[in-house]
Image (cartoon, grey):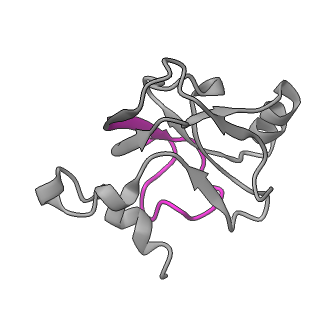
Amino acid sequence: RLLPGALTRNKNLNFICESTELIINSTKADWFGNLQHDNVISLPIAHGEGRYQCSENTLKQLQDDDLIALKYVNNPNGSIDNVAGITNLKGNILGMMPHPERACDNLLGSDIGLEILKTLIS
């Protein structure tokens, strides 16, 4: 109960493992380092239960409070409103389906995840 909503089975009921494009939707909380609002990044996803769902009232509250941190460009799993990550009101909790830890070295295809993970220690 740290964050509202629930993760459910992907819309196609299959496990998805691929890189996907994401939009930085909110920089209210400083989770994305030097990345700015509306920047598009690519991160790996790997999940069978990654479809974010919540009530319309909860979605409206998330939107009104600018708590939707990341959105999918091309929603791979059927998440409501393309949500890929949300924060709590204080901004000290981030829940996201993409895996920044899988994008920490250019040998893996990208090091953009390292930028995100560095915010945890700064």
Q: Is residue 46 left or right of residue 38?
A: left
Which quadrant of the rendered structure holds the N terminus? Answer: bottom right
Which percent across, then down, holds residue 74? 43, 23
Where residue 108 sits, quadrant-wise, is: bottom left
Q: Nearer the viewer, residue 19 or 47?
A: 47
Residue occupying the point 48% across, 24% down: 75
Q: Nearer the viewer, residue 59 or 98?
A: 98
Q: Nearer the viewer, residue 81 or 108?
A: 108
Where residue 5 sits, quadrant-wise, is: top right
Residue at the extreme right of the image, as rendered: 57
Residue occupying the point 17% across, 50% down: 109
Which percent across, then down, holds residue 13? 50, 22
Residue occupying the point 41% across, 32% down: 15
Residue 111: say if magenta.
no
* In this view, 13 is above or below 69: above
Which percent across, then down, holds residue 17? 33, 37
Q: Of helix, strand and loop, which mostly describes the magenta segment?
A: loop
Residue 24: say if magenta.
yes
Asked whether residue 2 is in view, the answer is: yes
Residue occupying the point 11% across, 58% down: 107
Asked whether residue 40 is in view, the answer is: no
Residue at the extreme bottom of the image, as rendered: 122
Residue bounds of the magenta highlight: 19-40
